[in-house]
Amino acid sequence: MSASAEDMGHYLIAQMNEGRYRGESVLSPEGVTTLHTPGPNTEAPSSPLAGGAGGSYAMGWVDGKVHGVPAVWHNGDDSRNGSLMVMSKSGWGMALLVNSSNPLSELEPTQYILSGVTRLLDGKEPALTVMPSIGRTYLVVDSVMLVLTVPILVAAVRLPWWYKNLRRQLPMRRWWRTALTVLRGVAEMLAAIAILLTIPRLYASWSLLTFGVPDLAWWLLAASAIILMTGLVHSGLFARALTRSKARG
């Protein structure tokens, strides 16, 4: 479903006007009340997006506080865009739409806007948010990516030298060192496959990840490809060196 900010404003008017919009009834007052009224034992966990407050679940809505403002609210995000609707118990409503979101930031920009606008509309001063900074988050992520990139590339670049040393040392190697060489190739291939198969389960799909955090997604794909290639080449070169060693022996 696609909706503009104006569309969401019309929707909020109906929600806050007992189901009526421009003189037409789209839902009964009782139905609107049912939508916004929490049931028994429906406690909602605290949400960083709402300033760390919790609340109670109604029918798609949370009855609680948004950055200290009593309200009924609902949010949604699919890593491509996000929306948030707030209906203050003092009589005003707000719809906030964003056309992109980043899971690494945990919607930090959305929360800054939400906090400021919600509190200003309620006659309060904007409050500091509890979300981690995008800048600090990316600094950590980029540093980890850089640290991991070095050994991944070194292992791939050193393959010719590794094979040369392997051929020379293989006849004199102890069995456990030979076993470790085999395990190394297998471990590299399994690690790459695990990344390719596990990430979609943690984050819905690669397509969403490449849209939401393209830099991290493409790095993971490239790193997985290099690790997989390195493992395959390690295993292939080891089998080749072992065959030649037996032929000479």
Image (tube, rainbow, N blue to C red):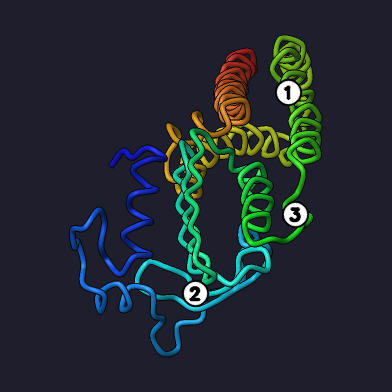
For label 3, the residue is: 126
Q: Earlier in the sequence, mark 3 or mark 1?
A: 3
What's the residue type where badge 1 is placed? Leu
Q: Quadrant of residue 37?
A: bottom left
What's the residue type where badge 3 is placed? Pro
- The secondary structure type at the circle numbered 2 is strand
Q: Earlier in the sequence, mark 2 or mark 3?
A: 2
Task: For the C terminus, give its image quadrant.
Answer: top right
Label 3 CA crowd tier, 10 Å (few <14, some 14–19, many 20+): some
Contact between marks 3 and 1 (CB within 8 A): the answer is no
Residue 184 badge: none
Q: Quadrant of residue 140?
A: top right
Is residue 235 among what the camera can see? no
Q: Earlier in the sequence, mark 1 or mark 2?
A: 2
Contact between marks 1 and 2 (CB within 8 A): the answer is no
Q: What is the spatial separation of the Cα atoms under label 2 and label 3, in whole angstroms?
A: 21 Å
Is residue 204 among what the camera can see? yes
Above or below for 207 versus 244:
below
Residue drawn at x 75%, y 49% is 132
Whole-percent x, y for residue 91 in the image: 49, 66
Contact between marks 2 and 3 (CB within 8 A): the answer is no
Whole-percent x, y for residue 10 in the image: 33, 49
For label 1, the residue is: 170
Number of numbered markers:
3
For label 2, the residue is: 63
Residue drawn at x 46%, y 47% is 83
